[in-house]
Image (cartoon, grey):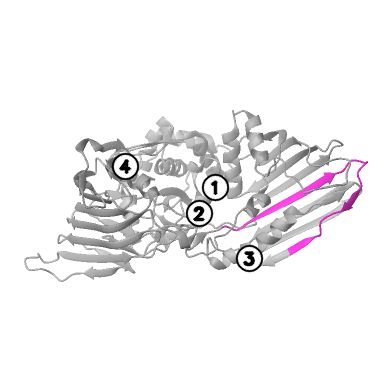
Amino acid sequence: MKHLAKAAAIFWSWCILSAAAQFIPAATIVRDVDSFHVRKNGEFTQIIETALRVETQQGVRRHGERKLYYNSKLEALEILEAYTQQPDGTRVDVDADKIRTQDGDGSAIFSDDKVRVIIYPKVEIGSLLVLKARSVQITPVFPGHFTWSRYFNPHHHYESATINLTHEPGIRLQFDADRVQGGRLPAQPGDAPGMGRYRFTYRQMQAYPGETGRVALSDFAPHIALSSFADYGAFAQAYHARAKPMAAVTPAIAKLAQALTAGATDERDKVRRLYNWVSRNIRYVAVYAGAGGWIPHEAASVLENRYGDCKDHVTLLEALLHAVGVHSTTAMINSGDAYALPKLPIDEPFNHVITYVPSLDLYLDSTAQFAPMGMLPEGDMDKPVLLADSGKIGRTPPSHPDGDFTHTQIALRLLDNGQISGTSTARMGGYLQVNSRASQFSYQNRDQADTVNDLLARFLESGSGEITTSDPLDLDAPWQVHAVFELDPMVNVPGPSAMTIPIGLAPGKLKSAAKYKSPTVRRFPMECTSERHRESITLQFPPTVQVQRIADNVQFARGPLSYTASYAMRGDVLSIEREYSVRRGKSVCDGQDDADWTALREVLQRDLRAQVFFK
C-alpha cells in the first residue's frame, strides 16, 4: 500500500547543515496556496500556486527541478504556469519541452503513478521559482469521501502558506488545525444551503536543522487536516468493503491450506505454517491501476501469480487462514517513523498493511520475508493499527530487551606472531534477528572475501575469515551466525605491549552503538528502541606471554539504561562479559533520553578502549 494514489503534491528536498547557528534552509517558501473545490461525490479540483526563493548553492542544485506526483487514472494534472524570476526581476519561462512526464519511481511497483518534472532555467541564489498547476481528481480514492492534510516542516521557512477550500452541499467535512490560523468562513450570498467555505493560513520564519532519528511530521508538526469520514471506524469500513471480497476461498486455496496444515497440532501451528509459506513463496511486487493502491487483488490471482504487494499478501493469507477455520483481518499501519494516528481519519500516515489474528493476539508481516512468526520488522513495532473488519484501533508490540537482543560468544587466541585467530557465534531475537537474516541473505552468492573485508573494516581490523548460517528464509530454523577468522597482527609479540579487545566477524553491537553521538540540541521527538546486547569473550595468550594488567570491572546505570563489564584471568585465558540493556517502555524519546545515552556512551567508549597489558 506504499506509493498510494494521492492528489498532486509538491515534494521538496532540503539541504541540512550541521550546526543550528549556521543553518540556512536551501530555499524559502515565499508563497504557497492550495485552493480546493470538493464535490459531494468526493471528486475535487485543486489549484496549486507556489513561489520558492533559492537561498543557497545547494538550493540551486536541489530545487532547479520540481516534481509533482499524481495518478494518471485518478487525476488530470495540468501545468498552468512555470517560470524563474531572477534576482533582478527578469522572468524566464520554462519551455514546454522542459516539462516532462515520467513513470512514478519505486522499486517493485508498477502502477499508474506518474511524475511531472519541471526543469527551471537560469536558477541562481536569489531566484524565485514560480509554479501554478491544476489537478482534477477524476475518481476519488474512496468514493463519496475526501481527505487531505498538510504538515509544516520545521526545517523550512514559510513566509506565507494558505489553504482555501469550498465544498458542495451533501458532503460533511471535519477539520483539525494545530498551530494554524483560520477555520470555517461565513456563507456568501448565493451559496447553496450546506455549502462550506474554509480558509487557513500559516507562517514560520524560524527553521531548524534536521535531527537524527526524528519521528514523522504527522506525529508532532503544525498541520491542517480535513476529512469527510465521521471516524476511524468509517474509514476502516470503506477499506474493508472493497478488500474483503478479494479474500474469497477458492478450491485451489482450500486445497493448499489443507495440505500445508495437515498434521498441525493447534491453531498457532496452522497459522505458522501458512504464514511461513506466504512469506517464502509470494514475492513482493505491486501491480495496480487507479485506486488499486487501496484495493488488493483477488487472493486466487495472487496465488496463481505468486507475487503481490502488502495488501495482496494479507488477502491471500486471510483466505488461507479462513480455509482452515482461523479468522484474521487487515491491520492498516505506518511502517516508517510515525507512532501516532491523527485526530481525524485521513490516509496519512497509513502506508502499509499487515495481518492480525485476534484469537492469538498476533500480528504478522509476511512481506518482511525474514520475520519468524511472533517477530516483526522494526518499522512495524509499537505502531497504532486500524483493524479493517472492526474499525478498532490496536497497537503492535513494542521492542523489549527480553525479546530484542543479541548474545555473542567470541573465542580469541593470540598467536606468537601477533595475529589473532578466532571464532564467534551470535544469537539474535526480535527485530534484530529479522535484520540479521536480511543482512546474511544479502551476502549470499557474493565474493565472501569482500563481505569479510567490509565487516572487519568497521572497527579498523583486517584479516580473513568465513561466515556460515542456516537458511535466512527458513523461518522455523533457529538463527545463529557463525564465523571463523584470522586477524592480521595487532600487537608485537613478545612485548611489552598492550591491546584492546578485537571483535572480528562478530556483530559488534556494542562497538557500533558507541559510535552514535546524540545531537547537542534535541528539538523534536525521536525514534528509540528497547533492547539488550551481551558479549562473552575469551582471549587466550601464548605460554610465552605474561599478562600484567587487565581492565577494571564496570557497572553503570542511568534512567532506563545500564551497562556492565567484568574481566577475569584464569590461567592464560582472559574472560570478558559485557552487557548493555535499555528498558524504555516507549518508542518515542526526547532530550532527556539523549542525556542518558550521552552519559552511558562515555562509560561504554572508555571500557571499549580499555587495554590488556602484557610482556
Name the mark nearer the viewer: 2 or 4: 4
Q: Residue furthest left?
A: 190
Q: Which residue is mark 2?
A: 359
Query: Relative to residue 484, is residue 101 drawn left or right?
Result: left
Mark 1 or mark 3, which has the lower sequence index?
Answer: 1
Q: Quadrant of residue 531?
A: bottom right
Choose between 334 and 449: the one closer to the eye.
449
Mark 2 or mark 3, which has the lower sequence index?
Answer: 2
What type is the residue that disc 4 sits on?
Gly
Choose between 318 and 401: the one closer to the eye.
401
Can the viewer see residue 138 in this picture? no
The number of discs equals 4
Mark 3 closeness class: few <14, some 14–19, many ≥20 residues within 10 Å = some
Q: Secondary structure at mark 4?
A: helix
Mark 3 or mark 4, which has the lower sequence index?
Answer: 4
Name the mark nearer the viewer: 3 or 4: 3
* Residue range corresponding to the magenta coloring: 529-555
- Tell me if label 1 and label 2 are in contact, CB under 8 Å: yes
CA gap, disc 1 to disc 4?
Answer: 32 Å
What type is the residue that disc 1 sits on?
Glu
CA gap, disc 1 to disc 2?
Answer: 9 Å
Task: Residue at 80%, 37% (x, y): give it.
Answer: 419
Q: Which residue is mark 3?
A: 560
Choose between 186 and 15: the one closer to the eye.
15
Which circle marks residue 168 in the picture?
none
Q: Secondary structure at mark 2?
A: helix
CA gap, disc 1 to disc 3?
Answer: 37 Å
CA gap, disc 2 to disc 3?
Answer: 33 Å
Task: Residue at 72%, 47% (x, y): give it.
Answer: 408
Q: Which residue is mark 1?
A: 267
What type is the residue that disc 2 sits on?
Ser
CA gap, disc 2 to disc 4?
Answer: 30 Å
